[in-house]
Amino acid sequence: MTPRQIMPLTPSRMSTDDIIISRKNYHTHTRLCKHASGWIDDYCQAALAQGVSVLGFSDHTPLPDGRWPSVRMTLEELPGYAGAVHQAKTAYPGLTVLAGMECEHATEYLDYFRETLLGQFEFDYLIGALHSYLYRGEWVGLYGNTITDDQLAAYADHLAAAINSGMYAFIAHPDLFGVPLRGWTPGADACSRTIVEAAVACQVPLEINAYGLRKKIIEDVDGCRHLYPLRRFWEIAAEYDGLQVVVNSDAHLPEDVWGNTDDAISLAQELNLHVVNDTLDEDIRIRNARTTTDCIHFTQQE
Ligand SMILES: [Zn+2]
Ligand SMILES: [Zn+2]
């Protein structure tokens, strides 16, 4: 993989079973999160120019307690965001726009996610994500810290709880623990398996996030690598039957609306992972027609 390439406008091709994967990106930000540029129209126009057929907006949700305000919109900005995304659904013939939000998982937010985001503002889907995790009752950021095997277990349990909540259409960058990790450890292996096993049990797709491929390369003890996606994580994921994978740009600039997502597809293709981008929009529609989102398959591992 190369960190950044100009990609062709034709759909990506999976050589293993010759399946064409449409350009459907379910992970897109806007300037409201304070670390992205562009507004909803800019991304819609870029999507049309780059042959993207489904564009899901998923800016970082504001939280009812105002936590982590530097990387998300305010609660006051939420109605404007929701209204603009819903308007875009009819403003761009030829483009299917979905309204979503990227959500930090915590039990105390679930009522807000369900009642305010999915209920009041009628978002089509939520993405579960952790940029921090709970360790011994404290939030620990994945950026700017190291991570021990004990903390990796806490991160994995936290993300498994997100998967098990039934709240999210998929889980963003489950391998974000690659940011603080240095050297692959037994804890990293166990962490990967906990996450993947929960995803398989609940049939919640895990995301290969192409934004990590646009970020800097670091020198780890085993050589140079991206902070994420973590190749070792996805190799472990490939050992499991029934895992669903979604590939997304995680666009923070309009020109990255598809970005280097073909690189993420190449990784999935190489490892024979099952990419569900083509059917995820329909799955979201079906899911919204259901009355319950509880996962009935998952049993908590000891
Ligand atoms: Zn972001
Ligand atoms: Zn994101």
Image (cartoon, rainbow, N blue to C red):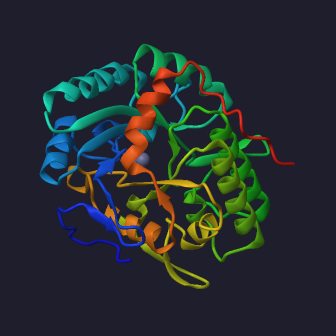
Residue 186 x/y as whole percent: 77, 71
Residue 60 visible (yes or no): no
Tell me the quarter of the image containing the N terminus: bottom left
Q: Camera-side residue: 250 or 32?
A: 250
Q: Which residue does the image show at 43% across and 69% down from the upper left? A: 269
Residue 79 x/y as whole percent: 34, 19
Question: Does 225 appear above or below 45?
Answer: below
- Name the residue furthest top: 120
Q: Which residue does the image show at 26% across and 52% down from the upper left? A: 257
Residue 34 x/y as whole percent: 34, 42
Asked where in the image residue 265 lies, by quadrant, the reply is: bottom left
**260 left or right of 198 in image:** left
Number of numbered discs overlaid on the protein picture: 0
Residue 16 x/y as whole percent: 42, 72
Residue 297 visible (yes or no): yes
**282 left or right of 8 in image:** right
**95 left or right of 145 in image:** left
Q: Which residue does the image show at 59% across and 71% down from the upper left? A: 235
- Name the residue furthest right: 302
